[in-house]
Amino acid sequence: MADISLNNVLINGADAANQVAESWNATWKNVLGDSGSLGGATLYGVLCWVGTVFAVGTLIFLIIELYKDLNEGKPLVLQSLVWPLLVAFLLNNNGVLLARSTLSLRDMINKANSQALAITMSGIKLDELYREANGKIGLQAMISDTLRPCQSLLGEAQLQCVNSALERSRSLVDAYEFAFGGGGGSWIDGIRGFLDGVRDTLSQDVLDIGVFGLLKPVWMPIVVSVLYWMQIAYQNLLEASLLITALLGPIAVGGSLLPYGAKPVFAWLTGFFSIGFARLCFNIIVGLTSVVATSSGDGDPFWFALFAGLLAPILASSLASGAGLMVWTSISSAVGNTTKAVAGFFI
């Protein structure tokens, strides 16, 4: 029989996103710092130094471009003066302001993800539905593992084995019911009814052989656990990508003095929010799909594990690279146009 700790993981699947974010909190604070400046040769401090070198290099191109415009009689554009001041302000003191701003952006993304799973649909919270879907998978898998050894036995030995397995299965059901706060919904009642039906046949010393036909394949719990950890790995991958993107912030800011093309800082913001958009899409997709998984009655819920562990990450990444990127690129373009308009107003 599998260890119930596996199912403690499964039934708490709805908290995975928050748990992943919380587990990375210390790393974020150690890398960026509560104040953005931990002192000494920190990783973020080194990258701020690299960003400053980039800023000095691009500032040379900016000065050359300004000198060229002045020689040609072109008016001085205000944004050409604002950007150097903004870059110096953000990279000053090991990027203290930039680090604080980045941490605030991450907190905003985490809050949006938490609220996405906390919303209520038809009076039931999505995080509770998600938890029930994982619980249904875990409980069915464990009951199958408990009854499977009896399949190869015959006669009285099989009856005794099934009777013992039923006792263990009922203990598992009680454990799940306790984990769900004394409830759990119709899916737990359905499993309990199935066990009661098998027990009634045993009281007549008769066992319906069709009971074993309801057992899940022996490899199914393994596949479910692998898919679940793929889901956790995807969320950790997003968190790591978000941190790496945050670390590249000083370089993006430093390169924004280049007078040609789009500002790298807008591309950096686009990447940062696209990753956050992927997390948001993933939580919404899995949350809504859990509605179907928990309302499927006696249907097989194992498809939900496949969807949450493999298909949902692919779909969320596709949406983030498509719609999310388009949205934040449009916002970046709007910010750039607004900056030019304001600068032109003061000329």
Image (spheres, grey):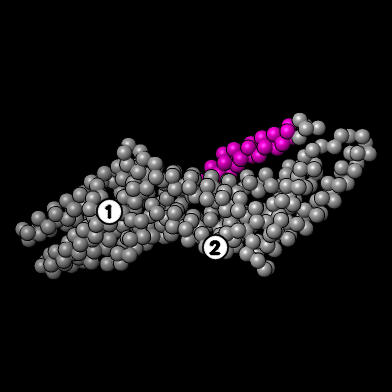
Q: Residue 27 carries which label?
A: 2
What residue is rendered at 16% in x and 66% in y? Answer: 164
Magenta part, dominant SS: helix
Residue found 90% across the figure and 43% down from its top: 67
Residue located at (63% from left, 46% from top):
269
Q: Viewer-proximal residue, 315 or 21?
A: 21
Residue 191 picture location, percent across and down: 21, 52
Identity, as a three-letter code, of the amino acid under mark 1: Phe
Asked whether 275 falls inside the magenta stretch, the response is no
Q: Give the range drawn in magenta.
A: 316-342
Asked which secondary structure carries label 1, the reply is loop
Alpha-carbon span between mark 2 and mark 1: 32 Å
Task: Tell which of 5 and 293 is nearer to you.
Answer: 5
Indicate the position of residue 244 as horizontal and vertical percent values: 61, 57
**Which residue in the rendered view is the most extreme toward the top?**
345
Label 1, on which residue?
A: 180
Residue sitting at the far left: 204
Q: Say if residue 217 shows up in the picture.
A: no
Q: Where is residue 126 in the image (x, y as percent from the top left)?
A: 37, 44
Quadrant of the frame with the C terminus: top right
Q: Residue 210 carries which label?
A: none
Mark 2 in CB contact with mark 1 (< 8 angstroms)? no
Does 55 sit left or right of 126 as displayed? right
Tell me if residue 336 is in the magenta stretch. yes
As drawn, is 25 to the left or to the right of 265? left
